[in-house]
């Protein structure tokens, strides 16, 4: 169907849809590893690119292609490249943009593995990096070197909820001819479109809001131009970072309700954040919808809403965090985020418990920090659950 001029939710439902010969309302799952050629010449034409045709699912597949087209349409990009996980998307970008002698600038509080893989694994390929507080543009400017070949941002960042000025950093990057990639996982295309703000590449852990049902691990890269698409897609294929058709089908189904899921979770998040901010056992709350957020004004200019991710600090530190985690009844004590279920986790005693004090500090992890991903349950129940858990602290 012709998708031009459709609104977000209409695109989320229809974009990329396959015209099925039997007229099924829902696109079928092409659960196949390979595709038959009509004859040897046809095979040759598909391989040379003279004819569009599917060859092998690692290279391309109709079900995966539908999802790629849909997310690219929502991100206002040239094309989408689906990957088996969010980290596969991150690594495809790193592999394509970096190399021996190259340097990357990253925001200091990226999702942990997006930073640790650069500071660990990639150093053996002669790649260097500077992780700086990119909420201050001058820190990025000062970190630029002649060999800098990628700026990697994540905004809002996980779990600090720090917000980076995408327009300002892309402006600087353009002056130095450095590509910018933004991890848009926390917002999803419903709340923020980094490509419209000057970025060259967007990545998603679609495990989170885009799929939204905690039943799939998946990633996506969207590029602004054909040139970046042509640079990145072959890397995904040769590295085997591809998605599986069934994974793509589930994610495409989740994507259809992205807008209404975020509307509901966000409406509740505003109430939950205010409840927490007024609670005597809570030291501070970081939520882009609260005036107390240091980048409240910036959030309003680059995001269409504050989202459904909240971080807060408990007054009693580590012990209080553990007690609260053991006391929640409805919220799931689990990592991940962006699903229909409210998820809660305490990084200092869980995901980041093995990190040194310095590493925790660098990642913005304090002893009482709690990360909350607000789901679509009734807001009264979410608040009542947090209230009774805080009473145990
Ligand atoms: C912001 C962000 N980027 C990337 C990832 C990695 O995604 P995945 O777990 O799908 O590999 C995560 C996972 O939590 C994340 O929160």
Image: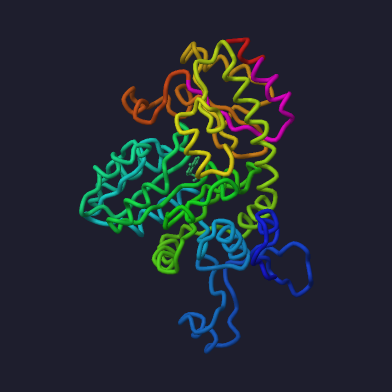
With 164 as the anchor, is 391 left or right in this view? right
x and y, in percent, of residue 102 in the image: 24, 54
With 170 as the anchor, is 274 left or right in this view? right
Q: Quadrant of the C terminus?
A: top right
Q: Is residue 151 above or below residue 36?
A: above
Q: Is residue 388 above or below residue 168?
A: above
x and y, in percent, of residue 312 in the image: 52, 23
Q: Is residue 382 magenta?
A: yes
x and y, in percent, of residue 45 in the image: 50, 85
Q: Which is more toward the observer, 332 or 274?
A: 274
Colour approach in the figure: rainbow
Q: Quadrant of the N terminus?
A: bottom right
Q: Is residue 306 above or below residue 292?
A: below
Residue at coordinates 57% horizontally, 45% vertically from top-left? 191
Q: Which is more toward the observer, 246 or 116?
A: 116
Residue at coordinates 40% horizontally, 55% vertically from top-left? 93
Residue at coordinates 60% horizontally, 44% vertically from top-left? 209
Q: Quadrant of residue 334?
A: top right
x and y, in percent, of residue 309 in the image: 56, 33
Q: Is residue 348 above or below residue 38?
A: above
Q: Quadrant of residue 135?
A: top left
Residue at coordinates 66% horizontally, 36% vertically from top-left? 265
Q: Which residues are magenta?
A: 369-387
């Amino acid at each position: 169907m012709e998708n031009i001029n459709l609104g977000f939710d209409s695109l989320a439902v229809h974009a990329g849809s396959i015209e099925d010969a039997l007229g099924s309302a829902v696109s079928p799952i092409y659960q196949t590893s390979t595709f038959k050629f009509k004859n040897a010449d046809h095979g040759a034409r598909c391989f040379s690119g003279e004819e569009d045709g599917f060859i092998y699912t690692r290279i391309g597949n109709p079900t995966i292609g539908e999802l790629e087209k849909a997310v690219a349409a929502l991100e206002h990009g040239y094309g989408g490249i689906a990957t088996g996980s969010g980290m596969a998307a991150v690594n495809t970008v790193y592999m394509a943009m970096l190399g021996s002698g190259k340097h990357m600038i990253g925001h200091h509080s990226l999702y942990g593995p997006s930073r640790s893989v650069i500071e660990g694994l990639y150093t053996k390929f002669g790649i260097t990096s500077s992780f700086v507080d990119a909420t201050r543009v001058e820190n990025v400017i000062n970190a630029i070197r002649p060999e800098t070949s990628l700026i990697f941002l994540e905004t809002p960042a996980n779990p600090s909820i720090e917000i980076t000025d995408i327009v300002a950093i892309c402006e600087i990057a353009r002056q130095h001819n450095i590509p910018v990639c933004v991890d848009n996982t926390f917002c999803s295309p419903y709340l923020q479109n980094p490509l419209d703000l000057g970025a060259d590449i967007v990545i998603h852990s679609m495990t989170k809001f885009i799929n939204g049902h905690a039943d799939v691990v998946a990633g996506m890269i969207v590029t602004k131009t054909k040139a970046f698409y042509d640079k990145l897609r072959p890397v995904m294929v040769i590295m085997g970072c591809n998605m599986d058709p069934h994974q793509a089908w589930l994610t495409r189904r989740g994507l259809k309700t992205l807008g209404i899921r975020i509307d509901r979770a966000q409406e509740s998040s505003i109430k939950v954040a205010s409840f927490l901010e007024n609670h005597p056992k809570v030291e501070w709350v970081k939520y882009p919808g609260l005036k107390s957020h240091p980048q409240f004004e910036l959030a309003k200019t680059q995001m269409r809403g504050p989202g459904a991710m909240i971080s807060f600090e408990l007054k009693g530190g580590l012990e209080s965090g553990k007690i609260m985690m053991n006391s929640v009844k409805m919220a799931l004590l689990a990592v991940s985020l962006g699903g229909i279920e409210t998820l809660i986790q305490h990084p200092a005693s869980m995901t980041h418990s093995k990190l040194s004090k310095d590493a925790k500090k660098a990642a913005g992890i304090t002893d009482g920090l709690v990360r909350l991903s607000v789901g679509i349950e009734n807001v009264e129940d979410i608040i009542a659950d947090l209230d009774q858990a805080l009473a145990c602290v």
